[in-house]
Amino acid sequence: MAKKIGILTGGGDCPGLNPAIRGCVYAAERMGYECIGFRDGWKGIIENITMPLNRDIVRDIILQGGTMLGTSRTHPYKREKGVDMLRETFKKQNLHALVAMGGEDTLGVANKLYNDFKLPVVGVPKTMDNDLSGTDFTFGFDSSVTVALDALSRLRDTANSHHRVIVLEVMGRHAGWVSLYTAIAGAADYMCLPERPVNLEDLTKKIKAAYAKKNYALVVTSEATDLPTTDKGQVQAKDDFGHVVLQGRGVGEKLADLIEEQTGIETRHAVIGHIQRGGAPTLFDRMLGTRVGVGAAQFVHEGKFGVMAALKGDKIQPVPLQEAVGQLKTVTKEWMDFSELMF
Ligand code: F6P
C-alpha cells in the first residue's frame, strides 16, 4: 500500500496555494505516495474532514487563486483537546507525513507539533505579506502587489483628472513590504510603513512639492502604519493567534484626513483589502508555488522533517521551521535607505 501524505493550507489564503498543492501532489505521486487533503487548515485534521487529492483532481488548479482545500485561522493548541484529536486523525488516517502550507501562524503550529511530538511535518511557506524569515520570498506576495499596482494606476487617472491627493491603503500586517513594493514600482509620491512612524513634516513637505509639479499626488500606506492619530489603547478584536484585526482600523482614511488638514489639498482614500488576495496567481507565484510544493514532497521522501521548503537564491532548500517562525521579516534599514532615493 502506498504511504500517505496529508496536505493542509492554513491562515489567510493567497494566490500560489493551488500551484503548491498541485506541485506537491504531482511530485508525491511520482515518488509512489498517495495524497489526501484536509479541509480548512488545522480544523480539517482536528475534525478529520478530508478530500481526495490526485493528479486528475489538481491538474488545472495552477490557474486558480485561493485554495481548493479551504482555510481557517484555527489554532489546535487553543481548541479543547485540539492537539489530541489532531494526533488521533494522524493515526486513523495512517499518515506517513503532513505537509502544512501557511505563514508564521500555521508554520508555528507545525513547528510546535514537530518539537512536542516529533510529528513528521514539512512546511510550505506562503503569505502575501512576505514577512516570513528563512525564505527569500513567499508566493502570494507577487500576485498581491500586482493587484495593488493595478489599483494605484487606476487611482492615478482619477487623481490626475480631479487634481487630488489619493491615499491607497494596502494589507501586509506588521511588515511594510506590500506598501514599499507598490509605492516604488507604482511611482507613488510617498509611502508609509508600519516599521516607521509617520513624520508629518516630511509627509506634508513632499506631498506639497509633488502637487506643485503635477497637480495631484499618490500615497501608499500599509494597513498597520503608526499614525499620530492612531487610537492606541483601544480594545481591538483579535484572531485565534492573537493578531489584532487590522481591517477597518481606518489607517488610509485617517491618513487622508491628516493630509487634507496639513496641506489644504482635497484628499481621498481607497482600501483594497481582500481584493489583493484573490485572482489568478502571477507567473512568479505559479512557479514558486509549484517549486516549493515539489520541494516539500521531496523532503518528505528524504525524511527531512521539521523543515520548510524555502527559496534561497534560486534554489529550494530545507530550512528549519524554527528559523521561519522565530522572528518576523520586516523592512530593514537598508531597504528604508534605498527607498529614500525614490521619494
Ligand atoms: O496575513 C495576510 C493578511 O492578508 C494580512 O495582510 C491581513 O492583515 C490579514 O491577512 C487579514 O486577515 P483576514 O483574512 O483574517 O481578515
Image: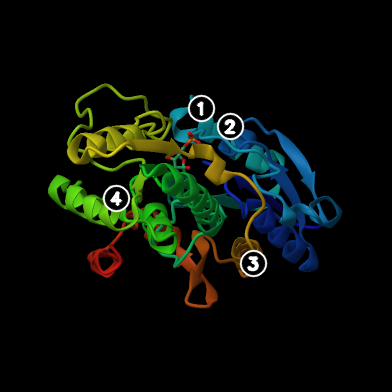
Going by the picture, which residue comes out furthest to the bottom? Answer: 314
Front disc: 1 or 4 = 4
Query: Could you say which quadrant of the image residue 45 lies in?
Result: top right
Question: Mark 2 highlights which residue?
Answer: 85
**Mark 4 burial class by Cα count in 10 Å: few <14, some 14-19, many 20+:** many
Which residue type does callout 1 highlight? Lys
Per the image, label 4 sits on a secondary structure element best described as loop
Foreground of the two, 222 or 311: 222
Cα distance between the residues tagged 4 and 2 = 41 Å
Question: Mark 4 highlights which residue?
Answer: 193
Label drawn at residue 81: 1
Cα distance between the residues tagged 1 and 3 = 38 Å
- Asked if the residues shown at circle 1 and circle 4 are in contact, with their CB atoms under 8 angstroms apart, the answer is no
Which residue type does callout 3 highlight? Met
Front disc: 1 or 3 = 3
Per the image, label 1 sits on a secondary structure element best described as loop
Which residue type does callout 2 highlight? Met
Give the percent coordinates (x, y) of residue 79: 48, 27
Q: Is 45 displayed left or right of 185 in the figure?
A: right
Q: Is 216 displayed left or right of 144 in the figure?
A: left
Q: Counting residues from the N terminus, which is met first, the one under dot 4 or under dot 2?
A: 2
Which residue type does callout 4 highlight? Leu
Above-or-below relation of 335 to 249: below
Foreground of the two, 180 or 100: 180
Q: Is 329 displayed left or right of 61 in the figure?
A: left
Taking the spot 34% from the left edge, 56% from the top edge, the residue there is 214
Front disc: 4 or 3 = 4
